[in-house]
Image (spheres, helix red, strand yellow):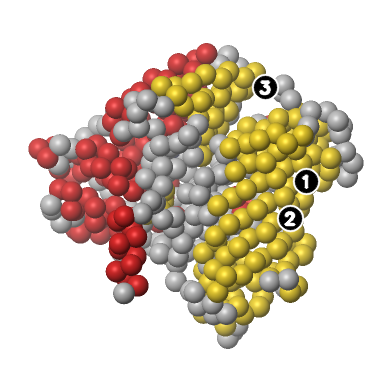
Amino acid sequence: MRLLICIVVTIFSHPIFAGLENAPPSINMADNRGKAVFVDFIKADYQIVYDLSKGSAWADSTITFENTESGYAIFDLVPEAASASVDEKTVTISTYNISGVTKVRFINAVLLPGVHTLKIRNQISENITFSGRQVKSAFWTDDLSDQGFLEQYLPSNLEFDQYKINFNVKIVGTDTAHEIFTNGEDKLLATNEWSVEFPEHFNTSSIFFHLTPMGAFRKLAFSYRSMDGREIPVVVYGNQDLNGFKLKIQSTLMELEKDYGPFPHQKVVVYGAGSGGMEYCGATISSLWALSHELTHSYFARGVMPASGNAGWIDEAVASWRDDGYRQSSLSELSVSRMAGHSPYTRQTDRDAYSKGARFMGYMDQLFTAKGGLKKFLRDFFERRVFKPFQTQDFHHDLELFFNQTLDAEFNKYIYATGRVKKMQNQDAPSPYHPRLTKAELKALL
Ligand SMILES: [Zn+2]
């Protein structure tokens, strides 16, 4: 009955945002420590205070979540928690290493199934600088590294989960005015105080947030008329000539809308900076040459959303295949990979995606030329799954269904490489569009 209700709701109601369907399996922790369970975040309110008199920033977070089995609730937060409570009872936060793959935090108390409230306090010290009466801070992310998303700054869930996120951001100890750039709906509450509400489909990889002293960057605001009639507000900012960015945004959005349908986000925010870039929902930090690649990710990566590191290759493969002019590949150009064959707890994208992944897409296009080619499928995949986290198995299955042909042999050899390739390959190789920046380089972008 429950299944039936789920099906009925899925068909007849508005989108349901993901909870546990794509979560990795629960963990029986070593040394008989008990079971750690993934949970469904429902809502997270983050109160973020930048205190210039102390030169520090702190987050007080209130997270409502549900667990469906008893156990130690898993989430993530890279900084140490200064204090935490669940349902008003003080708890400690511990770390669990998933050997050779990743690590997560868990609440050190067995929780019965149900809805709980986690309150937690932590300092934010990544990508932040204080100087005199000014602060600069950004929540840059990185999907080519483990623990690279919002968890670097705030307590969050893993990529499989979507939840309602609200920020309240305040700067105290200065009267120098600041401004924020974000892909949420921001409201200025007072000088140096904002609320930001993010859409319910956002997850830990979605948020773009950048706080700077007022007027630190040039700004260009305009609107893009979508094919569906919307006037989508666009803000581009940076320290360079922004007109080239404006033209590139307009031409790229026109191209992507023609290929894949209306732009899925409510706004576009582009920070023109860096070498290469990083993508967010409807937003990016990007150099001009990488901009069309990064905006493609607003469809593939931050439109249809990978639910885990094992699904991360698909968006890089699609974006790189596009960069390469959607070139077709022959079977002889393909190489064995295990881009989607890593541990279910993997959180980073396999860098083989840019080369082997892109060629796999080119091969699929060649294989199905007579049936309309791969882009036709990608448009359908995007339309049906927009804002829904997916796994590689979903992509594989949908592709087979769309073209009415089994692809198990191709996926087993070139994507899952079950038993053939032991380790994640090329994780130190440079990625053309998403170079790994040093801490100093990241700070210089603030
Ligand atoms: Zn990319």
Which label sits in the foreground, 3 or 1?
1
The residue indicated by pointer 2 is 60
Q: Which residue is drawn at 45% across and 16% down?
A: 247
Q: Residue at x 58, y 14 (%)?
A: 241
Question: In the rendered image of this protein, does residue 33 appear above or below residue 76?
Answer: below
Dot 2 crowding, Cα within 10 Å, few <14, some 14–19, many 20+: many
Tell me, yes or no, if residue 6 can be seen here: yes
Classify the position of the N terminus by image quarter.
bottom left
The percent position of residue 23, horizontal first and vertical second, equals 45, 65
The tag earlier along the polypeptide, 1 or 2, is 1
The tag earlier along the polypeptide, 3 or 1, is 1
Question: Quadrant of residue 274 in the image?
Answer: top right
Q: Judge from the rendering whether residue 360 lies leftward or rightward of residue 64; answer left or right.
A: left
Dot 3 crowding, Cα within 10 Å, few <14, some 14–19, many 20+: some
The percent position of residue 162, horizontal first and vertical second, equals 49, 54
What distance separates the C-alpha of mark 1 from that of mark 2?
Answer: 8 Å
Question: In the rendered image of this protein, does residue 60 appear above or below residue 180?
Answer: below
The residue indicated by pointer 1 is 49
Classify the position of the C terminus by image quarter.
top right
Discs 2, 3 touching: Cβ within 8 Å: no
Residue furthest to the bottom: 32
Say which amino acid is labelled 1. Val
The residue indicated by pointer 3 is 217
Say which amino acid is labelled 2. Asp
The percent position of residue 109, horizontal first and vertical second, equals 66, 78
